[in-house]
Image: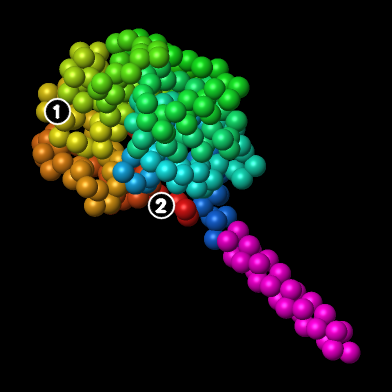
Amino acid sequence: MQRADSRYHHTRRYSKQLKHVVLLGLILLIAFVPTFYSIHITHADELQIWFFDIGQGDATFIQTPEGKQILVDGGPDDRVLQKLGSVMWPWDRTLDAIVVTHPDADHITGLVNVLEQYEVREIIETGARGTTPVIRALDEVIEQEQAVHRIVKMGEVILFDGLTLHVVWPLQTYENEQPDDRNNTSIVLLAEYGQTSVLLTGDAEVESEVGMQSFLQDVDVLKAGHHGSSSSSTSAFLKQIQPEVTIISAGVDNRYGHPHPVVLDRLSQIGSKIFRTDLDGDILLTSSGEEPSIQPSPLPF
């Protein structure tokens, strides 16, 4: 009798636990359905560019209206997996391309996890290398990934449906080289979709800005170089490209003091509207090919 009572109580306890798990699952589903509806249905016929709130680092996710998906950098840790899980369908485990702007830990650490968990069709980089543990880990997973490997430099064009990515820096490739100044080897992409233009600058600093400045005209949106460091976003560069909106990816209370007050002042002087991941969280740009819309759009993770 005691054994029967024990089994009965154990079954009741298990049943209650199962009900709690199911209830929690339903609550989470109800909570996330509006977010998924907003992302996948409301903006289904538009270009989406997510500037993820990834801490002190960079991770930008692009989805074309036709469904092509490109991840530019992966941030300093595995938070990028949660962000991707918030903007991609749960069963979608493929990315059309990953862009490695340059091999600094705050841009590539998350890419190791992404390459382990997603099928990636194309990897785009400059070829620059280094000797840090995270660079070696990234090299290992890239080698294992059965992806097209593309080494790029200024002047190359990458097409994804109606989205055109112009490589406007660096001047050369760095295949198997270990440059001392990795920031100025960053891939800089000018993304154009209809009349919308977005400049993604990695950690490009003064040297890069001077080199590409004469090739650029006004842009709608600038992703500020090097997290708003004073060594980037010079007055001359900003006056040349005249961004209507500037996105700054930086961590809350980061030890570098990014974004630097002098950069914020430079942007204020040209009348550029500023969005910051440390203050605004995740930032979503949408465009149907005309004037883009930019707004903070926090994700559930």
Image position of 184 (left or right of 116): left
Taking depth in this image into account, of 2 and 234 the one nearest to the observer is 2
- Which x, y percent locates residue 117? 58, 38
Question: Residue 273: which disc?
Answer: none
Residue under pointer 2: 298
- Which x, y percent locates residue 250? 28, 43
Q: Residue at x 27, y 26 (%)?
A: 183
Q: Residues within 10 Å of mark 2 (few under 14, many from 20)?
A: some
Q: Secondary structure at mark 2?
A: loop
Q: Main secondary structure of the magenta part?
A: helix
Splitting the image into 4 quarters, where does residue 172 fall?
Answer: top left
Splitting the image into 4 quarters, where does residue 174 fall?
Answer: top left
Q: Is residue 19 magenta?
A: yes
- Which x, y percent locates residue 266? 12, 35
The residue furthest bottom is 1
Residue under pointer 1: 234
- Amino acid carrying label 2: it is Pro
Q: Residue at x 33, y 18 (%)?
A: 178
Image position of 285 (left or right of 183): right
Q: Secondary structure at mark 1?
A: loop
Taking depth in this image into account, of 176 and 168 the one nearest to the observer is 176
Instruction: Tell me which segment is drawn in magenta.
Output: 1-29
